[in-house]
Image: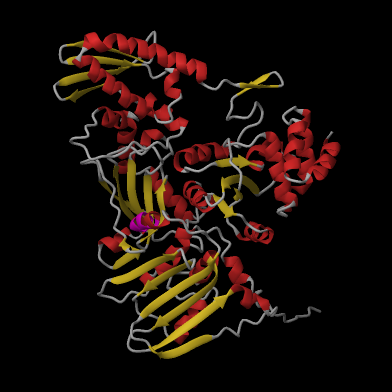
Amino acid sequence: MVRKTEVDITPDKSLIKKLGLVGYRTEQAIAELIDNSIDARIGGRTEHVHVGLDFGRRQITVTDDGRGMDLGELKDALTVAKETKDEEGDGLGQFGLGMKSACSSLGKSFTVTTTKQGRQPTFTARYDEDQWLGDGSRDWSNFEIEEAEEGSKHGTRITISNLKVPLYPNQLSNFRRRFGIRYGPYLKNGQIRISVGSRDCEAVEPELEEGTRRSVDIKLSSGRKMVGWIGLLKRRSIKGDYGIHIYRRGRLIRAFDKFGIRRHPEVAKIIGKISLDHVPVNFHKTGFLEDSLEYKEAFAMFKNDPTVAKVLRSSSSQKTGTFEIRSVLEYDPDTVPDKPIDTRMSAANAKSLLDGADNMTIRRGPLELDVEFESIEEGIYQISCSGNKARVAISKASVVFKTFKNPLFLLGLIRIEAELVACNPSKYADFVVERNRRWVEFIDKFLPKPETRNGRMEERIVPMPNYSLEAELVELHDHLKERFVHDFQFTGLSTLFPFLQNAYSKIIYNVQAMKGAGQELLEIISDHSKEITVLLNPKPFEVETVLKVAEHSRFMIIREYAERLSTTWATPEKAWLDLYIEVNKKKVTMYRDELAAILAELLESNLIDPKKLRSLAKHRNILGEIETCMEEGE
C-alpha cells in the first residue's frame, strides 16, 4: 500500500538573501532595476530613469517617472518568482526574480516607494535582511506595505542601503558608458533618458571605417530571423573592446562578445550588433543559455554567414599594429586633438602590435619618412637622410622594445630623432649612433636578470619551471595587466591546480587585490571571462550557496589584501599558504583533503623552500599549524 503525506515546502526565508549571491556585478544589478523602469514606461513619452550613488550615506537609488504600481502590483513585484511578463511580449523582465536578487546583491536593506499614475496612493515597502531573518520563522505572509495619501508624482524609487558593494569615483563615468551601450537603442530612439549622477547617458556609437558596415539578416530553421550588422572599427582595439553586442528585446545582454569569432588581434577591428530575441537567457539576464538549441543554431548560422565571413576576412587581411603605429608617427599636436598614449598594454599585445607592423611612408611637413621594420646589425634603429627624405630602419626584435610596456612611446621618440637628423645631419648623425649604443648598454646592464633557485633559472615574474598559472587563466592574466591599474596576484589553485590529486567538477581559483580595488577587479574579470563566477570577499556560507546554484563550473574568489603585491603570480610558498588559509580560516572546505598531498608534492619537487614557508606562516601567526602540516608532508 502506498501512503501519501502532505508536507510544507515553503522556501526558507533566506532565499531572498541567497538570490543576491548569483554573481551580479554592480552594473548588472542596477541594470535589472533599470529594466523594470523601462517596462513601466508610459507609451508616447520619454521616461526619465535616474541612478544615484550617494557616497556619504552609502546608498544607491534608481528612480523613474513611469506608471508606478498599485498595491497588487507591488505585492507581485516583491513575490519571489512571480512571473508577470509574457514570454513573447516586449518586457525585459521575465522570471520575477530581478528586483529581489538585484537589490539583495547590492545591499542588506532596500526600500521601494511607488505611486500609480492618476492621483493614486503612495505605497512603500521596506526590506531589512537582518530583521527579515531575525524572527527565525518560515512565515512569508507578514511582509508589511505602508500606504500614504495620494502622491503628487507618479513613478517608482528604489533605495538600497547598508551596501554590500563598494562605491568608487570612476563608477559614475563607467556606468554612463556601459549604460550608453546597454540601452543604446532606447536612448537613440528617445524612449528613455538615463542619468547617472548629474549627467545623462548617451547612446554609444562605434566609430566605423567608412564603407565597412554590412547588414546581417539570417533566417533560422524555426522561421525566425536574426538581424543586425557587422563592420570594422576605425581603430583596432588592443584592449579586447571588439566583437558583437548581443541584444535581447532591445536590452544588451553581452557587450564585445566574441560571438562566432575568435579572440585574436587579427580580428580586433570587428564590431557589430545582433538581436537574439528568441534565445533563452539565464534568470539574472547576464548571459544566454549556451547549451540551448536556439543558441547553438544562432552561433553556427552567424559564424558561417557569407556576409560575416567576408568582413572577418577583411579584418584579418589588415596587418595588426599598422594603424596604431602610423597614428603615433604622424602625430602633430598642432592639428590632431590632444590624446595621450594608453600605457596599459600587456606584453602579448605589445608583441602583436610590433609583429603586425608594415613598412610605411609618412610626411612630416616638407619631410618624407620611409619607415622600414627589419633586422639591423647593431642598435635599435638607423637613420639616413638625403635632402627632404629620411629612411628609418627599426629592429622590432631589439631587446630594448621588450623593456617598454608600450612600444608606441619608443617609436614616437625615434620619429622625433629622425626629424632632428633630417634637419641637421652633420650635428645629429653621430649622436644617433652613440645613443643606440648607450641604449643597448643600459638595457644589458640594468635589465633584471633571471634568478637562480636550486641551480635552475627562473624569471622574476614567472616563478619557476613546473609551476605556472593555470592555462585557462593566462589570457585573463594578460588582460588584467592591460586593464587593471592596481596590484593583483593570482594565488591558491590559480597556480596549484596541476597538483590536485582528484578530479573536481567545480574549481575555485584565487586572486588577490589591494584593499579597496576588489570591486573594480571583479567587474573587469566578469566582463572578460563569461564562464567564471566571481565572488568578492565571500563568507563561507556564500561560497557554498553559489556552488549549488551557479550555472558555471569555474569560480574565482577575490580577496582584498592589505600588503603590497610585488608579482602577479604568488610564489609556491605563498600560493599554498593562501590555499591553506582559504580552506581552514575562511572555511572554504572543498579542498581540505588535498592540502597535505599538494604540500608533499611541492616539497618533493623542491618547489617550496621550507624556510620561506615557515617565515610566511610566522608572519600570519599560524606557524604551529603549518609545522604540523610540513611534518606530515615530509
Question: Can residue 112 be seen?
Answer: yes
152 or 421: nearer the viewer: 421
- In this picture, residue 407 sits left or right of residue 359: right
Q: Residue at x 51, y 85 (%)?
A: 145
The C terminus sits in image quarter: top right
- In this picture, residue 62 sits left or right of residue 135: left
Part of the protein shown in magenta: 175-180
Q: Residue furthest front?
A: 427
1 or 555: nearer the viewer: 555
The N terminus sits in image quarter: bottom right
Q: Residue furthest bottom?
A: 149
- In this picture, residue 360 sits left or right of residue 350: left
187 or 328: nearer the viewer: 328
Q: Residue at x 28, y 68 (%)?
A: 191
Secondary structure mostly seen in magenta is helix
Q: Residue 409: within the magenta?
A: no
In the picture shown, does residue 119 fall above or below 605? below
Residue 224 at x, y = what percent?
36, 59
Q: Residue at x 66, y 74 (%)?
A: 12
Q: Residue at x 38, y 45 (%)?
A: 243
Which colour assignment does the render follow?
Answer: secondary structure
Question: Can residue 280 be seen?
Answer: no
In the picture shown, does residue 385 fall above or below 474? above
In the picture shown, does residue 557 fall above or below 600? below
Residue 625 at x, y = what percent?
81, 45
- Quarter of the image for residue 210 reads top left
